Amino acid sequence: MKLRQEVIDSKNVYIIDDILTDNEVNSFHKFASSLSYARTEKSIQVDQFPKYVVNFEPEKFENTTFLGKKSKELLEQFVEDSENYKVFRAYINLSLYGDVEFPHRDCPQGRGDITILYYVNEYWEKNYEGETIFYSEGDSQFCVLPKPGRFIVFNGDVEHKGGLPSRICKIPRYTLAIKYCYKNLEL
């Protein structure tokens, strides 16, 4: 496992590589590319350009897929009070050159949700771009390339934006998001 840690607004962001086999990366990519996506996902309320998405039943995904189980392991490893969290959403976003993304937060500030992102593509060149950008006070702080098999674990109230593939990228950018909230929280 390779681990990189960044800190933004006093919150840790963990970037984790090399915890899946090539076969696991390729297998999930093949699965993700076979799904039917609907253009319904919005980053913010006023988003007039929804992204393609496939939603999963969260608890079933967490308990029956190797990526759901791995995400739960990462939650337990990197989140202090992980036993107080429950999965409430699991989905894959599909982005293409020409789509639109907006900086957003996955939960209201202070709520404490945890987001685990997994980059689904089995192949990605850095010239394809598509980095996830993290912000503090409206200014970009760092970005993370969507390297195949890479995970990011972060607090959902950290502002971020999924980057879009460049013009030279002829394939979709797939990102799996698994979101956790406090067990006693009403959504």
Image: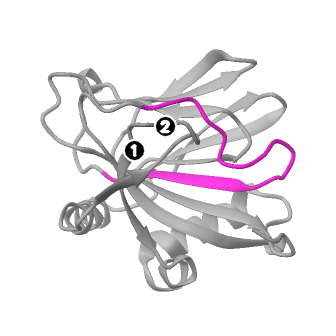
Residue 104 belongs to the span the image colors magenta: yes
Q: Which residue is located at x 65 percent, y 72 percent?
A: 87
Residue 61 belongs to the span the image colors magenta: no
Q: How far across and down, in percent of the image, does residue 123 sit?
A: 22, 43
Residues rendered magenta in the picture: 101-120
Q: How far across and down, in percent of the image, does residue 119 sit?
A: 39, 48
Amino acid found under the numbered disc labelled 1: Pro
Q: Which residue is located at x 28 percent, y 49 percent?
A: 121
Q: Which residue is located at x 84 percent, y 72 percent?
A: 84
Q: How far across and down, in percent of the image, does residue 116 sit?
A: 58, 54
Choose top left, top right, bottom left or bottom right for residue 20: bottom left
Q: How far across and down, in percent of the image, does residue 78 sit?
A: 72, 55
Q: 140 or 119: nearer the eye? A: 140
Q: Name the residue under label 1.
A: 50
Q: Is mark 1 on a helix, strand or loop?
A: loop
Does 172 appear above or below 28? above
State whether the magenta stretch is mostly helix, strand or loop. loop
Say left or right for 55 vs 72. Answer: left
Mark 2 crowd level (few <14, some 14–19, many ≥20, 10 Å Cα) = few
> CA gap, disc 1 to disc 2?
7 Å
Amino acid found under the numbered disc labelled 2: Asp
Check if mark 1's residue and mark 2's residue have beta carbons within 8 Å. yes
Does 38 appear above or below 15? below
Say left or right for 71 vs 34. Answer: right
Does 63 appear above or below 173? below
Q: Name the residue under label 2.
A: 47
